[in-house]
Amino acid sequence: MAFRLLLILLIGLMLTGNITPALHAQDEVDFDIIFEDEEEDENAEPIAAYPMPEKREALTPEQFIAIQKANSAILLDVRGKAEMKFGFIENSLNIPLYVLESEHEKLPRDEPIVIFCDNGMRALFAYDLLWSKGFKNIKFLNYSVTFEASGEYKIIGYHTK
């Protein structure tokens, strides 16, 4: 019964123009177009939006903790502004990934920078972006982190002894 009602609702929406079906879209478009004056290069490298480093420098949790305690690098938090209300790492700088490309000039190029976020993915993207902008003394934490409003944090999957 519920299936029939759903089917009737969908047909009604399609008839009124509120939903347009995308059936057989692949039949209408050829996605493998190669123009006569172009040759397909089997050895071609994928094109990136910016140059990529050959090797990224990821920190272990022990290294990250030591740097944070010694205050020996700029700790760059690339989480969004709204996420900061749930917690942060004391003495870190917050520049969200979504504005880092336009605000990277705020960072000193002559000091070491350690990038982190809540799960490592945005830190990795930020690393690649900063590297492409000429920052070479950068590292990132590729671990999940939980934050507290007190400035305390915990690296997930890592246990201190």
Image (cartoon, rainbow, N blue to C red):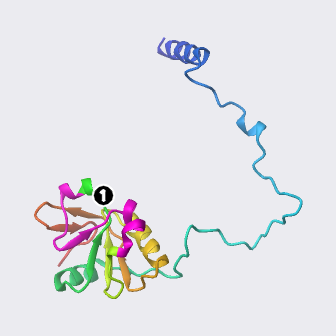
Identity of the residue drawn at 31% across and 66% down? 95
Is residue 99 inside the magenta stretch?
yes
Q: Tell me: 73 left or right of 129.
A: left
Give the x, y percent position of residue 73. 26, 83
Q: In which quarter of the image is residue 77?
A: bottom left
How packed is label 1: few (under 14 Cα within 10 Å), some, or many (20 or more)?
some
Q: Vertically, is 68 above or below 21?
A: below
Residue farthest left in this picture: 150
Q: Name the residue nearer the viewer: 57 or 95.
A: 95
Identity of the residue drawn at 19% across and 83% down? 71
Q: Tell me: 43 left or right of 71.
A: right
Q: Quadrant of the C terminus?
A: bottom left
Total numbered labels: 1
Q: Quadrant of residue 39?
A: bottom right
Query: In the rendered structure, which amino acid carries the disc numbered 1?
Result: Gly
Q: Give the range drawn in magenta.
A: 84-105
Q: Name the residue under label 1.
A: 80
Identity of the residue drawn at 18% across and 60% down? 87
Give the x, y percent position of residue 62. 25, 81
Q: Vertically, is 20 above or below 43?
A: above
Q: What element carries label 1?
A: loop
Is residue 106 inside the magenta stretch?
no
Identity of the residue drawn at 17% across and 74% down? 91
Give the x, y percent position of residue 104. 38, 72
Give the x, y percent position of residue 22. 65, 31
